[in-house]
């Protein structure tokens, strides 16, 4: 599993060809990639919000209680895995407009590998900071977009022109799915689960 992940950041064109061959030989091979790497943001966020904390006001550090952090991390994990599965379904549905005829497994697998930069960016959760989160998530968004536009024509065996149009459609739907899931998760966490904060003066 590690070789394709490294290639996604060093040789993305070759990585997508390798991933497609692996998928054809072993359907659902992406599941381990998805289920394991989706743990990175969830686990790091749990550690960061319970052990490091963050500062919203001068002279005060805020943490989450263990129970609240566990709820948040679980919601993030489920939203991540569920979001990838939903995106795979949309990619499969949109393929009818183009020449590609991928299976649902292939579409979910493609989505899982495309969002790999977000999994890696989850390491930033170890140090909760608004500006760090904006910087890291912004970089992950840019590189995931790059992987999408570079990888979709290769993975789906599409002509370049068709592949770019297909990728643009996926990008638009992906943004909608991401915003909807995150807003739903935050509303559920704040309004239903009612997080518990722990506060202490700095120093």
Image: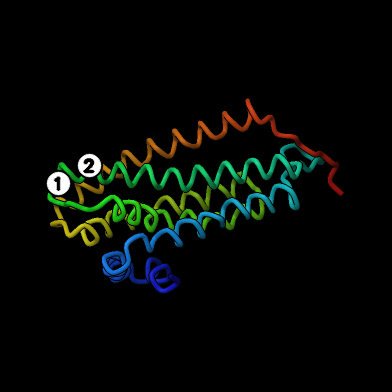
* Nearer to us in this view, 196 or 175: 196
Expressed as whole percent of the image width and height from the top left, the position of residue 7 reads 38, 71
Residue at 39% over, 52% down: 142
- Reading the image, the residue beneath label 1 is 98
- Measured along the vertical axis of the image, is residue 119 above or below residue 181? below
Q: How is the image coloured?
A: rainbow
Instruction: Say left or right for 144 vs 93.
Output: right
Give the quarter of the image for residue 74. top right
Count of number-bearing discs: 2
* Nearer to us in this view, 46 or 92: 92
Instruction: Say left or right for 127 vs 25.
Output: right
Residue at 21% over, 47% down: 166
Residue lying furthest top: 191
Residue at 29% over, 56% down: 106
In the picture, the quarter occupied by the N terminus is bottom left
Q: Badge 2: how crowded within 10 Å, few (<14), some, or many (20+)?
A: some
Mark 1 near mark 2, Cβ–Cβ under 8 Å? yes
Residue at 75% over, 52% down: 51
Q: Which mark is residue 199?
A: none
Instruction: Say left or right for 125 vs 36.
Output: right
Which secondary structure, mark 1? Answer: loop
Q: Badge 1: how crowded within 10 Å, few (<14), some, or many (20+)?
A: few
Expressed as whole percent of the image width and height from the top left, the position of residue 169 reads 25, 42
Give the quarter of the image for residue 173. top left
Which secondary structure, mark 2? Answer: helix
Expressed as whole percent of the image width and height from the top left, the position of residue 149 reads 27, 54
Instruction: Say left or right for 66 vs 21.
Output: right
Residue lying furthest bottom: 3
- Reading the image, the residue beneath label 2 is 94
Q: Mark 1 to mark 2: distance in Å?
A: 7 Å
């Amino acid at each position: 599993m590690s070789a394709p992940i490294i290639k996604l950041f060093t040789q993305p064109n070759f990585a997508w060809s390798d991933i497609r061959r692996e998928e054809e030989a072993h359907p659902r091979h992406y599941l381990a990639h998805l289920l394991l790497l989706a743990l990175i943001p969830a686990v790091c966020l749990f550690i960061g919000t319970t052990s490091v904390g963050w500062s919203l006001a001068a002279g005060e550090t805020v943490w989450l209680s263990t129970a609240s952090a566990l709820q948040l991390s679980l919601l993030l994990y489920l939203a991540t895995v569920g979001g990838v599965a939903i995106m795979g379904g949309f990619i499969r549905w949109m393929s009818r407009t183009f020449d590609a005829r991928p299976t649902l497994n292939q579409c979910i697998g493609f989505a899982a590998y495309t969002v790999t930069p977000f999994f890696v960016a989850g390491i930033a959760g170890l140090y909760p900071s608004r500006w760090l989160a904006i910087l890291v998530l912004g970089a992950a968004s840019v590189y995931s977009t790059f992987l999408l536009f570079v990888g979709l024509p290769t993975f789906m065996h599409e002509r370049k022109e068709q592949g770019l149009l297909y990728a643009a459609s996926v990008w638009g739907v992906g943004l909608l799915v991401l915003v909807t899931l995150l807003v739903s998760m935050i509303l559920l966490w704040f309004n239903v689960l009612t997080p518990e904060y722990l506060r202490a003066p700095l120093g």
